[in-house]
Amino acid sequence: MKWYKRLHWQIIIGLILGLIWGLLSGFIGMADFTSGYIRPVGTIFIDLLKLIAVPLVLASLVVGVSSLNDMTRLSKMGGKTVGIYMITTMLAITIGLTVVNVLQPGATLPDETRRSLMESYSENVEGRDADAELLQQRNIMQFFVDIVPENFFQSASNNSNMLQVVFVAILLGIGLVNIPAQKGEPLIHFFESLNDVIIKIVDLIMKTAPYGVFALMAAVIVDLTGDDIGQALVLLRALGWYCIAVFVGLILHVFIVYSSLFKLFSKMRLRDFFKAIRPAILLGFSTSSSLATLPVTMERVEKNLGVSEEVSSFVLPVGATINMDGTSLYQAIAAVFIAQALGMELTIAQQLTIVLTATAASIGAAGVPGAGIIMLVIVLQSVQVPIEGIALILGVDRILDMARTAVNVTGDAAVSVAVAYTENKLGPLHFDEDD
Ligand code: ASP
């Protein structure tokens, strides 16, 4: 098959063309056209993916759980999944702190730039502050209370209630295992067939991914640059070291932590892993939403990496909600960067506090664009760094959001491989012609 017919190449081409068009439309005065007529194509694409997320999680998890005949295995798998998620998140933060302390990006920001950035973005910070305050008023028990819905249709009506959907699906699956097989069969068949239909729909939606990604990229670039590309470049230059620190941290995390995870818990080569989930990583990057990417991550992990549905249908939706290695790493770097830029020295104890609060903040962050920066307020407050400092980094957050989301998605997929391997549920790798 010709290289350009392969899906991931088509997505990459869409991404690059979107970037070029975004820049070009600023130059030739067509930014409004891009916002008004091209952006909606991207919005429709993301909405299609979001549309199938709840039914997909419900159907595949019910099928998965109802095929388990031993319920203790489910709780063992749950404990293991959450445990590995916590460990990879803390490692991500440690890597982030190391990189930011070595590179010291905040120290290089000229006084003048700092002042003008603070001035131009300080209004935007207020709303985020209020959002974070609401979140902060909830204690840890509220997290568990929130997992149990009082009405299933309410949970299914909002993609950000994914943990509630997971809870109901597990409950349904457990109920199905505990009634006579004959009685449960029709419902199991129903979910099996729903599951197959949805997987087919994911396939169809993915055929339009290159166009969707083109539109998303063009819209992002227009948002970033408006009609003034020069201004965007100035901003990037001023915050260049900070962006580089985040990129370096993310890359180190992927290569150190995930390759060690594979060495410990599977025989998979990092190369094969990337080859299999490429489209999901690219989608994470272009949508900035791990939740919107979830259907594609699930499809790739099951079909290509050989992770059984029992494992993936539990590990991935939970991961898309609570496991955000990229986000936590970014939060650690952002917090220290802001402190450095404001001339504050953070002690070791304060940096340890960042490990804890960034773990919690990344768990609390929803898998949607920009969630990470809202939760950053909590991290900053925990180490007494003025939250107004967020104004410094707002301008480049969209780009970093794309990169950290790609890592969030990669992390969920990597952990699903590790869990499947230890549960003896990892089948052979499989690649289609167009992979
Ligand atoms: N956009 C990220 C995600 O969906 C969350 C964040 O803002 O860091 O995974």
Image (cartoon, rainbow, N blue to C red):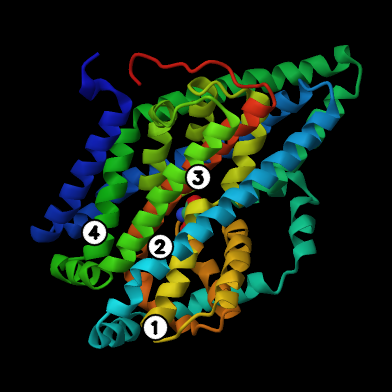
Q: Classify 246 as above or below 409.
A: below
Q: Residue beneath label 2, please?
A: 99
Label 3 – label 1 distance at C-alpha: 36 Å
Q: Which mark is residue 122?
A: 1
Q: Is 270 in front, or is 190?
A: 270
Nearer to us of marks 2 and 4 is 2
- Quadrant of the image containing the N terminus: top left
**Amino acid residing under circle 4:** Val
**Amino acid residing under circle 3:** Val
Asked if the residues shown at circle 3 and circle 2 are in contact, with their CB atoms under 8 angstroms apart, the answer is: no
Residue 126 percent location from the top left of the image? 48, 81
Counting other residues with Cα less than 10 Å from the Cα at mark 4, is it few (<14), some (14-19), or many (20 or more)? many
Confirm or reject: label 2 Cβ below 8 Å from ligand 1.
no
Secondary structure at badge 3 equals helix
Q: Residue beneath label 3, please?
A: 257
Secondary structure at badge 4 equals helix
Label 3 – label 2 distance at C-alpha: 15 Å
Secondary structure at badge 2 equals helix
Whether residue 288 can be seen here: no
> Number of marks in the image?
4
Secondary structure at badge 1 equals helix
Label 4 – label 3 distance at C-alpha: 35 Å
Q: Is 85 in front, or is 69?
A: 85
